[in-house]
Amino acid sequence: MLRMRRSVLQRMLAVGGGGLLTAGAAPARHTSAPRRPDRDITSTRLSMRWLGVAGWELAFGGRSLLFDPYLSRMPYQGEDGALDPELPLRVDRAAVARVAADELTGPPELVLVSHGHFDHIADVPELLAQPRWRRHRIRTLCDLTSRHLLTALGTPAERVADMIPVRGGEYLQFDGYTVQVIPSLHSQGADHGYFAPDVLTAPLAKRPTTLGELPEGSTLMYLVTFDGGPSVLLSGASNYIARELEGLRPDVAVISMTPHSGIHRYLDRLLDVLGDPPLLLPSHHDDMVSDLRGGATNTVWAAPTKAAVTALDTAAEGRAVKGSRVLTPRPMVALDITGALR
Ligand SMILES: [Zn+2]
């Protein structure tokens, strides 16, 4: 309640200007109108397709990139509902092949991996091995832990050799777009702990067979900026290093919405440091196991998506000046990002 009243006050102050500030009142953080991009961001049409969990396809001019594509949706909970690290890694090869053939734009040119946990990385080897994509160059950006994991999980040797090892801080030029790699952090729940935070410093001796054998490594974010198109910040876990985001002004922010109660003012600080991005997309908010097929009537994804959208909307409403609009992703349905930014 207190925060709600303070945000209303801040909005009034923003409208009225600084002259209304009285002793003891918190100054409004934003006194300008929602920002407008200072460059052309609509010539290159961009669409984005949520793949479930933290996975996204970014498609532009018949080309595409993938972020954290995870389609197997394997069981991960023990009887107590908690993540059971002993459960087997069970890649759903049929699901991966079906999505690659029927849902995606085509072979991606890049696969961006945020960290090594199973729900981000387990299907990458199978995607990179799709027979129909064999003739296409697909490069994977990941840290060394993920590289060791992808190698041990059976990624074709030529794809491993073509990986781009990153550690955060890189600003990479590609044909028609750039990728900035941003050091980040993994989500932390109420008790501040989290699953499998280890780092691999050497190749694995054998192929991992359980969920717990896929450790985090270092969590990374990516900022993809298209020539003549928008910039998109991609996060795969509900945390960040605010210092590393300072000065970035993405047009679109994909925001992980896994439990984050252990993070101080998770959404408000994020919107603050990013300057209230024009478009927000919730991610990683579904149950990670249920079949997402079934269209708009499927409450398996509709209810958690609505909750995540509402949480983002509430955070945007609480800002001094609401500058962000929240889009509702539907699994496998391409969102017209360029149209939404006009
Ligand atoms: Zn995850």
Image: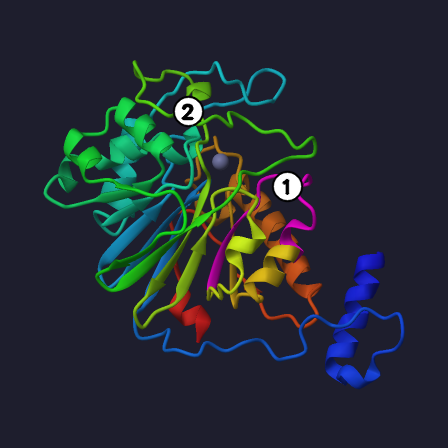
- The amino acid type found where label 1 is placed reads His
Against 127, is 296 above or below? below
Which residue is at 47% across, 23% downward?
Answer: 75
Q: Element under label 2? A: loop
Q: Nearer the viewer, residue 251 or 147?
A: 147
Q: Disc 1 or 2, which lies upstream in sequence?
A: 2
Magenta span of residues? 252-268
Against 96, is 244 above or below? below
Which residue is at 14% across, 45% downward?
Answer: 136
Q: Nearer the viewer, residue 309 or 165?
A: 165
Left or right of 29, for residue 134: left
Q: CA distance from mark 1 to mark 2?
A: 21 Å
For the residues labelled 1 and 2, say whether their Cβ atoms are less than 8 Å apart: no
Residue 128 visible in the current orientation: yes
Against 23, is 50 above or below? above
Give residue 179's quadrant in the image: bottom left
Give residue 82's quadrant in the image: top right
Q: Which mark is residue 260?
A: 1
Q: Position of residue 288 (x, y in %)?
A: 49, 34
Which residue is at 50% across, 23% downward?
Answer: 76
Q: Quadrant of the N terminus?
A: bottom right
Q: Is residue 302 magenta?
A: no
**Residue bearing mark 2:** 214
- The amino acid type found where label 2 is placed reads Leu
Which residue is at 65% across, 35% downward?
Answer: 189
Residue 281 visible in the current orientation: no
